[in-house]
Image: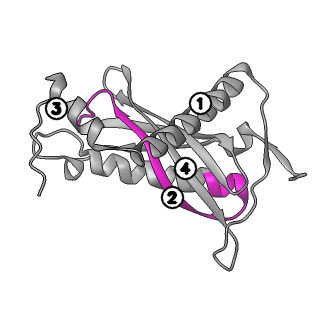
Amino acid sequence: MNTTFKTVSSSHITISELMLPSHTNFSGKIHGGYILSLLDQIAFACASKFSGNYCVTASVDTVNFLAPIEVGELVTMKASVNYVGRSSMIIGIRVEAENIRTGVVKHCNSSYFTMVSKDNDGKNAMVPGLILTTLKEVSRFENSVRQLDLKKEREYQKGIATFGSIESILSSNLYNVKVELE
């Protein structure tokens, strides 16, 4: 069992960047792929700061794009460790965009990255335990536990698809699908 513990606040990272025309997609909004790249960077920084080790992205569990980001807006990303396992951490990230002329701030994205701590030999390394000091931190930890349970259930369900389940999908008329097995 780990005897080292750190507070959630010791993991906090905030980055801000002005969105430029070079960051846009074909519709003139900031490209989601560019935002994903920034999300991965802040998740790495947050996890590495907390664990004291190099960290790698194991999965991107949720990325909800809630509002488009415009050229000229100041994007701020705030990250913290929400959950720790033995060598893994779930990093929660909130993305806000501020119109620098009007001061209006909008919530644009919430994301959850699972990061794994690595030692100098590239093997999984134990991370510190997590000290929860606010009800919000307790809530985020509990939500992470629920998300992990749902993820395990989804993985289990993937392994039990049968012809019976295919027939029930086709007979329901709820889906726009046609099955042509070879």
Total numbered labels placed on residues in the image: 4
The mark closer to the camera, 4 or 3, is 3
Q: Callout 4, which amino acid?
A: Thr
Q: Tell me the tag on residue 170.
A: 3
**Residue labelled with disc 4:** 114
Q: Tell me the tag on residue 146.
A: 1
Q: Mark 3: which secondary structure?
A: helix
Asked whether residue 29 is drawn in magenta, I would say no
Q: Quadrant of residue 32?
A: top left
- Residue located 72% across and 19% down the image: 135
> What is the C-alpha distance between the residues marked 3 and 2?
37 Å
Judging depth in this view, the residue of 125 and 54 nearest the camera is 125
The mark closer to the camera, 1 or 3, is 3
Q: Where residue 42 sits in the image (x, y, percent)? A: 51, 50
Q: Callout 3, which amino acid?
A: Leu
Q: Callout 1, which amino acid?
A: Arg
